[in-house]
Image: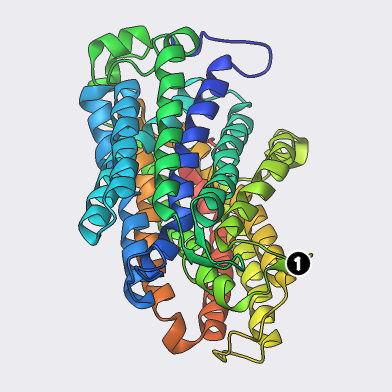
């Protein structure tokens, strides 16, 4: 039975999955933190010399397809591979992708490396989240708390990666002139460190999974052996009931809403990163903070705030909030965060292109803080509710559907970022803010009918 590994508090398997996901996110966010810079810097500077509009589209399609392939990887795991095998296949494929980016510094190497990362993530991402849910029964009140802890692992890796990889790419392996100005960035060594992080995560998972996860996720959900091992009823092969169909419908409804949350949120790695590089005063005490380091601000806030949210969701007030209300609040907070970026644009006197006129760092940091609170209201809660709503035989597939939102969102976000230069940052940030606040209000208004379709799941 999949819920037999129990400890006081949370099962130890949660912390193994925490560590595995931490190193995978270290790998992903490390390369993502330097990707837009690697694309846009000139060949002499250690980049590929791609113009900003094309680079934003490449970035958007890459980060989008990273979240499309989990739909396929989840289906393959459910029917043929089992979650544990899929995680290993995905991890090794992503590691190879990072090493290709390190070794082949051409556009051909770029596309091959990104392709391998996209395929690998499809096997890895939906299945590790599904394993977290399978550590708990559907009625276990610790489940939302567990996903907040797991989410902290994701963001611990995301916090460390840009700092470590930024040091390698913009310091240790950068070529500088006599005055210390960087002539050539060592981006390829950043990809190397990202690959080694992925390797470490796989070593941990494959040496410790048997001890701390037992037989959870070894066999595909479709297999009779899995049904017996996990104490799942033989009805696993029967058609979905009316109640199950309605719960699956809710997953699709929530997925449709969160597309627009992630389209705005993922501007952090594209338009916000480019804006920071050009127009934010990054100097503190005489030290200019590397642009890639700002990719660590959001995960730093996650690591700091996730324990508080973990406690809050198990409190009386936290339990009283339904999933649509939590997620609607998350979308509204995202919009409020973008209002502070409007403050940054206004401080510079609008959308002028004079890079000598800088905005205060305050605007960027407060934007990331509010976005982080919004993310904690939406993302871990969404992961948790998908594992509760999804029928057992479709568990990983439905996690893939949930991640499909991020696929569509990142492609939309790439197009949005590509038009910042022509339409102006103020117009783009204001439009995102107003639209996601509007959708958040609609989600809260739909709370009762959605809750009814969830049939008791909160």
Instruction: Inspect this view and state whether residue 448 appears.
Output: yes
**Is residue 345 shown above or below 241?**
below
Toward the viewer: 170 or 349? 170
Q: Which residue is mark 1?
A: 286
Q: Quadrant of the N terminus?
A: top left
Image quadrant assignment for residue 209: top left
Quick check: 335 left or right of 242? right
**Is residue 120 shown above or below 415?**
above
Q: Say which residue appears at 66% left-offset and 86% top-offset.
A: 357
- Residue 249 image position (x, y, % from top left): 37, 47
Instruction: Inspect this view and state whether residue 243 appears.
Output: no
Toward the viewer: 360 or 101? 101
Toward the viewer: 81 or 235? 81
Which colour style is shown? rainbow
Residue that protrudes farthest toward the right in the picture? 285
- Residue 239 image position (x, y, % from top left): 24, 29
- Residue 58 image position (x, y, % from top left): 31, 65
Quick check: 284 left or right of 165? right
**Is residue 425 shown above or below 408?**
below
* Disc 1: CA contacts within 10 A as few (<14), some (14-19) or many (>=20): few
Quick check: 316 left or right of 303? right
- Residue 138 image position (x, y, % from top left): 51, 25
Toward the viewer: 41 or 259? 41
């Amino acid at each position: 039975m999949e819920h037999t590994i129990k400890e006081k508090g949370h099962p130890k398997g949660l912390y193994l999955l925490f560590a595995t996901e931490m190193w995978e996110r270290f790998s992903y966010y490390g390369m993502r933190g330097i990707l837009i810079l690697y694309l846009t810097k000139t060949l002499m500077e250690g980049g590929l010399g791609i113009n900003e509009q094309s680079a934003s589209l490449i970035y958007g399609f890459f980060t989008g397809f990273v979240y499309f392939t989990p739909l396929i990887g989840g289906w393959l795991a459910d029917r043929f591979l089992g979650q544990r095998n899929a995680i290993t296949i995905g991890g090794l494929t992503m590691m190879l992708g990072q090493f290709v980016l390190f070794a082949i510094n051409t556009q051909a190497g770029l596309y091959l490396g990104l392709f391998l990362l996209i395929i690998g993530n499809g096997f890895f991402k939906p299945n590790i989240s599904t394993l977290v849910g399978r550590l708990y029964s559907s009625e276990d009140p610790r489940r939302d708390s567990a996903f907040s802890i797991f989410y902290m692992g994701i963001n611990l890796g995301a916090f460390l990666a840009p700092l470590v990889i930024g040091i390698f790419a913009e310091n240790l392996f950068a070529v500088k002139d006599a005055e210390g100005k960087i002539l050539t960035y060592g981006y390829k060594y950043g990809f190397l460190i990202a690959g080694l992080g992925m390797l470490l995560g796989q070593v941990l998972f494959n040496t410790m999974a048997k001890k701390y996860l037992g037989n959870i996720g070894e066999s595909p959900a479709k297999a009779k052996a899995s049904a017996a091992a996990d104490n799942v009823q033989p009805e696993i092969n029967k058609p979905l009931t009316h109640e199950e169909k309605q719960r699956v419908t809710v997953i699709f409804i929530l997925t449709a809403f969160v597309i627009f949350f992630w389209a705005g949120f993922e501007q952090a790695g594209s338009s916000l990163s480019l804006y920071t590089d050009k127009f934010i005063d990054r100097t503190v005490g005489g030290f200019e903070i590397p642009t890639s380091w700002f990719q660590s601000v959001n995960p730093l806030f996650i690591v700091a705030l996730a324990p508080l949210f973990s406690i809050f969701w198990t409190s009386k007030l936290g339990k009283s909030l339904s999933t649509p209300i939590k997620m609607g609040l998350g979308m509204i907070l995202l919009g409020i965060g973008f209002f502070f970026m409007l403050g940054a644009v206004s401080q510079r006197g609008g959308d002028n292109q004079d890079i000598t006129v800088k905005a205060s760092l305050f605007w960027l940091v407060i934007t990331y803080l509010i976005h982080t609170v919004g993310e904690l209201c939406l993302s871990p809660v969404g992961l948790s509710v998908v594992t509760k709503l999804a029928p057992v035989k479709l568990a990983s597939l439905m996690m893939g559907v949930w991640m499909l939102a991020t696929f569509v969102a990142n492609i939309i976000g790439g197009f949005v970022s590509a038009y910042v230069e022509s339409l102006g940052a103020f117009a783009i940030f204001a439009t995102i803010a107003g639209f996601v606040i509007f959708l958040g209000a609609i989600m809260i208004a739909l709370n009762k009918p959605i809750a009814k379709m969830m049939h008791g799941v909160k």
